[in-house]
Image (spheres, rainbow, N blue to C red):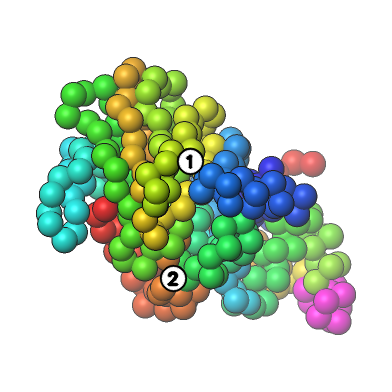
């Protein structure tokens, strides 16, 4: 099981062929137990005291709204912790081996929550902006939810993957760009909270991190829409 | 008066870290502070996290750096006191 813990990341070599085959066939690679229970507890502790705010997802070119969810403000302390956890060379190596993308330079994410309200949805879109090369979705829902299924379709508009998050800390990689699109079906009960983000080709995380540490400005800019 | 030096330690409850090039960067989620350890400090940190015992870490580092264990022990003790004071390490009983 590929798993990030408080002290590192485990990437068992024997898991990689199966993940690679799944990704090639469906555009998705499922990573059950991706965040360790201890890390999930650390994040959930802080999430419980956090406020989410309603925000629209808009297409960068037209400005058209294609979704509405609750977003966690980027200034929330959970966000730098997630970026710190997920920007690591061992993870970049693993996703490169599974997906076949070139080695990413960094990972940037956001956190959103979706509830059974009529206006909450995310329609088909492709995420293909801002140097993004691969998606990652992590379940941080403290409670079970109904609906809220992630669907992926290929450039021929054929559905290739349907992912319903099951366990806290479970994650999946998903293909973006080149005509691949995804959406989130409506949440019918409970509350769905996920960290969703993208491996990007640039800039380089290590360079940014060391420079930021030395200047005291260790921050990421907020992920753009679509 | 300085705190008693623990014999065994582990990573603090709210601490994340990663190695970047030859340095270690730590994030304490409690206060959102980042800390950096240079290459020698990074070796000490990794040895402490792996071994948990100051004595075993000192022995390991003495072997790596080919210097006497007492010198390493002194440097390691100073670092451990600092890291414990900042909540980056915590004392444990084994």
Name the residue nearer the viewer: B22 or A35: A35
The furthest residue to the front? A156
The residue located at (69%, 46%) in the rendering is: A18
Figure quadrant of residue A68: top left
Q: Give x and y (percent) for residue B9.
A: 70, 51
- In magenta, the rendered stretch is B62-72
Q: Is residue A138 magenta?
A: no
Q: Chain of mark 2?
A: A
Name the residue nearer the viewer: A177 or A107: A177
Q: Nearer the viewer, mark 2 or mark 1?
A: 1
Q: CA distance from mark 2 to mark 1?
A: 25 Å
Q: Give x and y (percent) for residue B74.
A: 74, 71
Q: Give x and y (percent) for residue A51.
A: 25, 37
Q: Give x and y (percent) for residue A52.
A: 25, 37
Q: Is residue A5 visible to the viewer in this orientation of the structure? A: no
The answer to whether residue B66 is left or right of residue A45 is: right
The image's mark for residue A160 is 1
The residue located at (75%, 54%) in the rendering is: A13
Q: Quadrant of the C terminus of chain B?
A: top right
The image's mark for residue A201 is 2
User: Relative to A143, does residue A17 appear above or below in the rendering?
Assistant: below
Label 1 Cα neighbours within 10 Å, binned few <14 / some 14-19 / many ≥20: some
Q: Is residue A66 visible to the viewer in this orientation of the structure? A: yes
Figure quadrant of residue B93: top right
The answer to whether residue A151 is left or right of residue A67 is: right
Q: Earlier in the sequence, mark 2 or mark 1?
A: 1
The residue located at (41%, 73%) in the rendering is: A202
The residue located at (87%, 75%) in the rendering is: B63
Q: Chain of mark 1?
A: A
| Helix, strand or loop under label 2 | loop
């Amino acid at each position: 099981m590929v798993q990030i813990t408080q002290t590192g990341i485990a990437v068992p070599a024997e898991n990689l062929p199966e993940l690679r085959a799944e990704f090639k066939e469906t555009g998705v690679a499922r990573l059950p137990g991706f965040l360790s229970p201890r890390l999930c507890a650390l994040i959930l502790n802080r999430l419980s005291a956090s406020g989410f705010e309603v925000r629209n997802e808009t297409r960068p070119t037209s400005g058209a709204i294609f979704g509405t969810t609750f977003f966690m403000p980027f200034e929330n302390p959970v966000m730098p912790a997630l970026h710190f956890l997920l920007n690591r060379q061992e993870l970049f190596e693993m996703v490169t081996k599974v997906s076949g993308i070139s080695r990413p330079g960094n990972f940037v994410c956001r956190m959103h929550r979706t509830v059974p309200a009529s206006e909450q949805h995310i329609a088909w879109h492709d995420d293909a902006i801002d140097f993004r090369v691969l998606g990652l979705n992590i379940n941080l829902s403290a409670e079970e939810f109904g609906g809220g299924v992630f669907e992926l379709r290929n450039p021929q508009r054929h559905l290739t993957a349907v992912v319903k998050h099951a366990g806290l800390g479970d994650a999946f990689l998903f293909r973006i760009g080149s005509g691949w699109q995804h959406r989130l079906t409506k949440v019918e009960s409970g509350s769905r909270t996920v960290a969703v983000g993208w491996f990007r080709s640039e800039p380089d995380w290590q360079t940014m991190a060391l420079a930021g540490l030395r200047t005291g400005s260790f921050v990421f800019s907020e992920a753009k829409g679509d | 008066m300085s705190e008693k030096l623990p014999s065994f330690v582990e990573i603090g409850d709210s601490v994340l870290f990663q190695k970047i090039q030859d340095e270690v960067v730590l994030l304490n989620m409690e206060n959102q502070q980042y800390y950096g350890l240079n290459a020698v400090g990074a070796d000490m940190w990794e040895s402490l996290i792996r071994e948990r015992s100051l004595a075993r870490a000192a022995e390991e580092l003495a072997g790596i750096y080919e210097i006497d264990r007492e010198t390493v022990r002194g440097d390691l003790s100073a670092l451990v006191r600092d890291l414990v004071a900042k909540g980056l390490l915590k004392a444990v009983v084994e």
